[in-house]
Amino acid sequence: MSKSKRQKLEDGFEVNPDDLDEIDSLFFDGGDSNHQERVRRRPSRIVAVISPKGGTGKTSVAVMLAGTLKTQRRKTGLLDIDPRQGVERWAQAGSGLPFPIYAFNAKQGAAAFRRAIRDAIREVDLLIIDTPSTMGSAIGLSLQVSDLVLIPAGASTLDLEAAQEAIDAAKEAQHGRDGDLPRLVVVPSRLDARTRIARDFARRFKELKVSVAPAVGQRVEVAAAANSGRLVRPSTVAG
């Protein structure tokens, strides 16, 4: 990676898709462009974004990850199992999002859910799951298949209680799986990392031995992106 590219990443500016593609080359042998061959060599990864409370930025995180992590070598997709179909509405507000969206009704049960997962990962390297804002069968099914669980949470008491509920459910799911999967990461939502409340937030989850991601600030650009049916512009602070 060139010095100028590294500087962009270190300074928090735009992430160049070529950089992500360069990283992918470490995992995908020889720059092979045949997707089916890549899938045969390396299984798809699944990331579930969960929160039993609305308004934490769950759908925003899911959409932005699917859009940002898509490269020439890595195909991403988003499985929307939220009955509100926020991802579909986001896409319909514009000319569509740059990755496939798969819809699933969790009421169809575990067997149908696993079939939906199998169908999706035949086509993508990374599948993001956007879940409902309630604890229930949909989140339970997602925890059974995910490699990584992201839990967006604000600093309010209600947010913290919801995050704790999601963590407990994810840790329970780990008991029946190999490799301590799914891995857990809390995503601070609408927090300014420079504030005391943000530091207290990070300390709380460190004591619980749960990793904390960099904070997602409260950015008008995210709302504008959803209203326009597009991704956040990389040149903005939110991007």
Image (cartoon, rainbow, N blue to C red):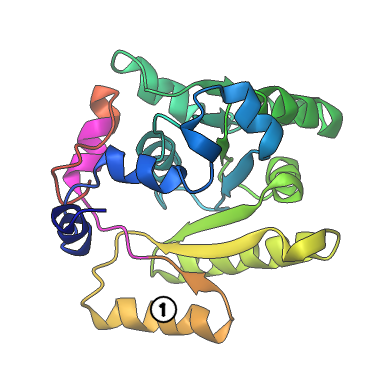
Q: Look at the image and say whether residue 215 sits in the magenta stretch.
A: yes
* Vertical placement of residue 207 versus 164, above or below: below
The answer to whether one can see residue 123 in this image is: no
Left or right of residue 67: residue 139: right
The magenta segment is: 214-225
Q: Which residue is mark 1?
A: 202
Residue 67 position in % (x across, y down): 38, 34
* Vertical placement of residue 193 versus 99, above or below: below
* Residue at image location 77% in from the left, 59% down from the top: 173
Residue 37 position in % (x across, y down): 64, 26
Left or right of residue 238: residue 179: right
Residue 46 position in % (x across, y down): 62, 43
* Residue at image location 52% in from the left, 58% down from the top: 151
Q: Quadrant of residue 176?
A: bottom right
Could you tell me which secondary element the residue under label 1 belongs to?
A: helix
**Mark 1 packing: few (<14 Cα in 10 Å), some, or many (20+)?**
many
Of 123 and 170, the residue lying toward us:
123
* Residue at image location 72% in from the left, 67% down from the top: 171
Q: Look at the image and say whether residue 90 sits in the magenta stretch.
A: no
Question: What amino acid is found at the position of numbered circle 1 in the picture?
Answer: Ala
